Amino acid sequence: MTGTALYRLASRGLPRLPFPLNVRIQRLGRTPRAAGVVPAGQHVETRTAGGVPVTWLRPSAVDRAALVYLHGGSYVTGPVAGQWRWLSTLSAELSVAAIMIDYRLAPEHPHPAALEDVVAALQALTTAEVLRRGRWALVGDSSGGALALAATQILIAAGSPLPAALVLMAPWVDLTLTNPRIPSTEPADPVLSRRFLQPSAAAYAGRTPLSDRRLSPLYGDLAGIPPVHITAGTRDILVHDVRLLRQRLLDAGVAVDHLEEPGALHAYPTLGAGPAADRAVAAQASFLRGRLDPDQAPGCAVRSESGPPVAAVTGRPVPPPATPLIPSKENVMSKRLSTHVDIEATPERVWEVLTDLAAYPMWIPFIVRAEGAVAPGRRLTLTMQPVGGRATTVRPRLVEVAVHRELRWHGRLGLPGLMDAEHAFVLQPQDGGTRLLHQETFRGLLVPFTAASLDRNTLPAFVAMNEALKRRAEDPARARARTGPVDGGGTDAGRA
């Protein structure tokens, strides 16, 4: 069972259990290390900062910029795999480093332990100039989002260096949970419940009143906060406090980019694949590029609950996110694997390699047979045999053939609804080369039981295939005519 599923079970399904037992169940899904979760080949290091353990992703990219992440988990657990994947995806999209601070958890370590850890780590990293002025952002979800805001307030009061921006996903900014609109939303929220959050808040607060601004930064001084990007879903019981936070930030003169997704759940960008998560990551990346990239002017926007983004007090609208590549339902019965690789070859050359099916066994280690005509509606025959495993043959149907741009097929395992999969290769021109997005979305009843295996086995296979494709496409000796049949005559008839 995934960490997200355990969180839901603990929060909604087992609220009457003794709180310590509930926390123990929830912690079964905790993933304190990134290894085995982030894409294979991504450099991961564990260090300390100010005496606090921190995990680095892509540390060599810190010269460009860095994201400092505070995970959610109601102050009693976390991180989970979905949070690592979100952080890895966003840092890769921006080509920057990422740092997760492993702050102490309640109830073993009540307030102010977590906040002290975060501030100590940030001050150590900025004092050592590992984090440079204007080149880092502080990001967090749920309780981590509240920690990010509270820590920033402390940094302002202390005159310490500040992040260039904050990215907050459904921040839990009021531990009192007294907003009168929460009861109206709670029945529609399958993730959070007051029955779990209230004892979590009490365990974290210890002897400190829940309304203390260090616990509930909604009540603190918001003047001087850097530009903020906030996401929330309308099926989240915290959405009402997030709306209050947005308004109070604006009243304090803070630039705010606010994205509220109808029907989305708590901290939905970290829950997995789906159009809503895609839109959120695209909006977060666009916002951060404007704040962390010196070649682009900063900008901000406010997204209303019923309309498109409008310009905020000082800024330009954020461009609308691109249409998601692979739609999927946002629930525990769907999972998306996503990788990318930059290839020093034209999209035409990469397309040539991708559509030369007969040559697949020559460069893809786990494919021993590949046949079929590359045209919309046609079926392919792919026989795969992992090292030490049994051969499996699948016959997916091509659903998109946009020449030099996109190749996508759909297949299923057994009866409809058990395990459907949609595989996509998207080619994006980039500085004389190509960025290849390689993705697959799985849906069906078997997904919750295979999610760990997909991360452990399938995702590394995708990364290995990316690297093999990169080597083949960049090899000038192989840049010759195709050896396999392609239906469509090389025209643009298949473009979307």
Image (cartoon, helix red, strand yellow):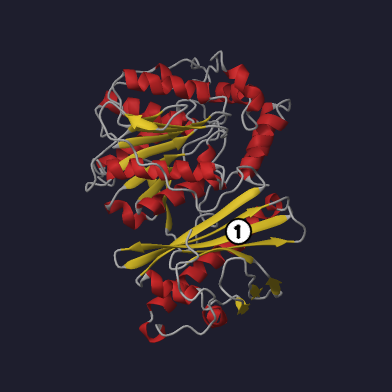
Residue 188: x, y in percent?
A: 64, 27
User: For this rendering, which residue is in front, 21 or 465?
Assistant: 465
User: For this rendering, which residue is in front, 159 or 5?
Assistant: 5
Q: Viewed as shown, does residue 455 lie left or right of 128?
A: right
Residue at 45 percent across and 26 percent down: it is 112
As drawn, 393 above or below 92: below
Q: Which amino acid does label 1 sit on?
A: Glu
Q: Viewed as shown, does residue 224 lie left or right of 100?
A: left
Disc 1 is placed on an element classified as strand
As drawn, 381 above or below 224: below
User: For this rendering, which residue is in front, 373 or 50?
Assistant: 373
The local crowd at label 1, few if under 14, some if 14 to 19, many if 20 or more residues have their Cα within 10 Å, is many
The answer to whether residue 111 is seen in the rendering is: yes
User: For this rendering, which residue is in front, 181 or 76?
Assistant: 181
Image-quadrant location for residue 318? top left
Q: Dot 1 corresponds to which residue?
A: 422
Residue at 49 percent across and 17 percent down: it is 208
As drawn, 2 above or below 248: below
As drawn, 375 above or below 231: below
